[in-house]
């Protein structure tokens, strides 16, 4: 047995259709394109999503809302409840959050602390932004919320 004799019916590559190779091939003359018309010409056909002149779906569907994606300020969000894994008196910053795998990466505008969950430990939290409830919960637990720029 030789390597070139091995066959796998599922993965065996099918040879491509060779068109325009004479009458005997069964795909000669018009090369499977039919007679005349838009699709028979080189460079013919229509662009993707063309609906024959009918108003395209993307233009028929109503647009709603406002998308400010280009200028949006994207923050890595962390809930107050997930800071519970830190010890009393610890300083929580970007490096500490990455080290403890609370965050996998820091977004361009930094970290924003959200107020979901409960905090019982006194921590010094350093982040770019805090929600009002997050700041309140951190200070209520005896910690400090420091805004870093």
Image (cartoon, rainbow, N blue to C red):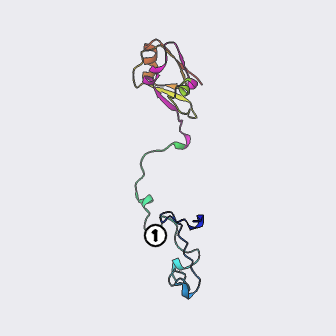
**Where on the picture, by quarter, is residue 80?**
top left
Q: Nearer the viewer, residue 145 or 92?
A: 92
- Residue 26 image offset from top left, x and y in percent: 52, 84
- Number of labels in the image equals 1
10 Å neighbourhood of mark 1: few (<14), some, or many (≥20)? few
Where are the magenta residues, as a range?
70-95
On the image, the x and y values in percent for residue 133 come to: 42, 22
Is residue 53 rendered to the left or right of residue 4?
left
Which of the two residues, 89 or 63, is positioned nearer the viewer here? 89
**From the image, which quarter does the C terminus lie in?**
top right
User: Quick check: 24 above or below 46?
Assistant: below
Judging by the rendered image, the residue that carries numbered circle 1 is 53
> Residue drawn at (56%, 34%), measured in percent from left and top?
107
Q: Would you say residue 138 sits in the magenta stretch? A: no
Does residue 89 belong to the magenta stretch?
Answer: yes
The quadrant of the rendering that contains the N terminus is bottom right
What is the x, y in percent for residue 139?
46, 14
Say which of 99 and 139 sits in front: 99
């Amino acid at each position: 047995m030789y390597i070139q004799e091995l066959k796998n019916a599922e993965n065996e590559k099918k040879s491509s259709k060779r068109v325009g190779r004479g009458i005997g091939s069964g795909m000669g003359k018009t090369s499977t394109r039919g007679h005349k018309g838009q699709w028979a010409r080189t460079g013919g056909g229509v662009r993707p999503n063309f609906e024959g002149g009918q108003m395209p779906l993307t233009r028929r569907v109503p647009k709603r809302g406002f998308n400010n994606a280009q200028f949006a300020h994207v923050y890595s969000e962390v809930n107050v409840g997930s800071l519970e894994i830190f010890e009393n008196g610890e300083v929580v910053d970007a490096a500490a959050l990455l080290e403890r795998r609370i965050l996998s990466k820091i977004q361009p505008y930094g970290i924003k602390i959200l107020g979901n969950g409960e905090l019982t430990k006194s921590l010094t939290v350093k982040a770019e932004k805090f929600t009002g409830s997050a700041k309140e919960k951190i200070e209520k637990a005896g910690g400090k919320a420091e805004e870093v720029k």
